[in-house]
Amino acid sequence: MTRVTTSVPAAIRDLAAGAAHAAGVTLRPVDDVAGIAEVADFFCDVWKTPRSTPPYPAEVLHSLVHAGGAVHAAHDGARLAGASVAVPGEPERRDSYSLVAAAAASDRGVGHAVKQAQRVWALERGARTMRWTFDPLVGRNARFNLAKLGATGTEYLVDFYGPMADGVNDGDESDRLTVTWDLLTPRPAEPAPDAPPSRLTHRAPDGGPLAGRDADDRRLRCRVPADAVALRAADPALARRWRHAVREVFTEAFAEGFAVTGMSRDGWYTLTRGCEEAGPR
């Protein structure tokens, strides 16, 4: 994607500035050696890897910036509180791709501020959508992506990265859910139904309900564990059973034309049949 002169709506710039202010951080793109090294070390801390084996090496991040991508850093004073990496996507789709976005704390709004900075960066370069992947078992991330940002789950990827050896994903299969974010007009979050699904179709590994459908078969709900990361550390075998159970529900649903449109506070996904994928305008 070549850089184009594109005006970003004032409301979106104001939202990004307001998100950074509310989180108490200063956000800026970094392209210097020291700044990128700091971000690489930050990702080591987030993914619990030694500094000698970073998940995103500094030299790789520097190369991505040189190739037209962006590394954003969110500082709380002198402390790095969040960071992200994004690259241009397919020019004909007016797309962009977020490789990673992370925050040191999940309750301060730093993650939201980082995503808004990425949004402005992508819009400035002519993109109209942004895609990224996340672990579908991690409900808090699903709620952020689907309910907070209003992205749509558009693709289920089985064991996307193969075996991973970081301190968060080690020992599990790396299934991922792709979300697509319409950068100009994010889709309003799908309200989570208050009532359980009308027809239970799958049981969860803990014996409770896993998934079910509404009577008209246009909406499906699927539950994930309350804390998948903690479960993976405490009982890897049970975590793998959850992985396979959720995988079965999602792959069947996507094959039937469902998309992921919401996540409730109590860990239930909403999938909707016939939901149009976000796309360029």
Image (cartoon, rainbow, N blue to C red):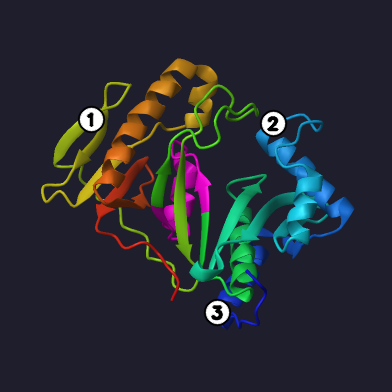
Q: Secondary structure at mark 1?
A: strand
Which amino acid type is shown beneath numbered disc 3? Ala
| Quadrant in which residue 187 is drawn | bottom left
Decide: is 247 above or below 234. Answer: below
Alpha-carbon neighbours of circle 1 within 10 Å: few (<14), some, or many (≥20)?
some
For the C terminus, the quadrant is bottom left
Q: Upstream in the sequence, badge 1 or badge 3?
A: 3
Q: In the drawing, does residue 256 fall left or right of residue 65?
A: left
In-front residue for pair 196/100: 100
Q: Residue 236 lies in magenta, yes or no?
A: no
Q: x and y percent of residue 171 in the render?
A: 55, 21
Q: Which residue is mark 3?
A: 11
Q: Upstream in the sequence, badge 3 or badge 2?
A: 3
Q: x and y percent of residue 29 in the render?
A: 75, 63
| Quadrant in which residue 113 is drawn | bottom right
Write the start and end of the magenta stretch as one range. 132-153
Q: In the drawing, does residue 244 fall left or right of residue 33?
A: left
Q: Secondary structure at mark 2?
A: loop
The mark found on residue 48 in the picture is 2
Marks 3 and 2: which is nearer the front? 2
Alpha-carbon neighbours of circle 2 within 10 Å: few (<14), some, or many (≥20)?
some
Alpha-carbon neighbours of circle 3 within 10 Å: few (<14), some, or many (≥20)?
few
Kindly report the distance in space between the C-alpha atoms of the residues bearing marks 3 and 2.
37 Å
In-front residue for pair 94/217: 94
